[in-house]
Amino acid sequence: MAIGISARISAFVDALPLKPGLRVLEIGCGPGVAARAVASRIGDGFILAIDRSEKAIRLARAGSHNEMAAGRLDFRHAAIEDFALNSSDALFDIAFAMRVGALDGRHPEAGRIALSRIKAALKPDGRLFIDGGDPLKEIDLDSSLQL
């Protein structure tokens, strides 16, 4: 386990199907602990981490100079319900979120919007993982969006 990473976050990141070269989207990155852990596991891949809190994004950027300088990690201030790819963004292979209200059932309407935004940001075979499993669970975006 890396220094500065909780057992919960470490177990979640370890369970993600990560491999070199993947493009990963983290939703609700907070101070960037999981994003940095993912960046260290995807080689020449890339992770974009978003959060609705400007303060969280500032903290995440402040602690991620090396990963950002290497071009493996970037942060964006955005809520998932408002997130859209920039014209220069490529689609993502994997998205993940831990303790995000729009994805854990606390805010159903925001959740429906969030799922459609995530699906639009992922490759056709892209996968979404959230907490709530042991230690994570995969969300089937096709079935979830038909509800």
Image (tube, rainbow, N blue to C red):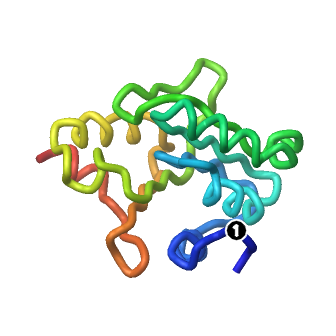
The N terminus: image quadrant: bottom right
Specify whether 132 is left or right of 18: left
Relative height, residue 15 to residue 61 (above, below): below
For the view shown, which residue lies furthest in the top direction? 87
Q: Quadrant of residue 75?
A: top right
Q: Which residue is mark 1?
A: 4
SS assignment at label 1: loop
Would you call the spot at circle 1 few (<14 residues within 10 Å), some (14-19), or many (20 or more)?
few
Residue 95 rendering spot, x and y as whole percentages: 49, 51
Residue 18 rendering spot, x and y as whole percentages: 63, 66
Residue 142 rendering spot, x and y as whole percentages: 27, 50
* Residue at 48% in and 51% down: 126
Foreground residue among 123 and 61: 61
Specify whether 15 is left or right of 40: left
* Residue at 69% in and 63% down: 37
Q: Amino acid at mark 1?
A: Gly
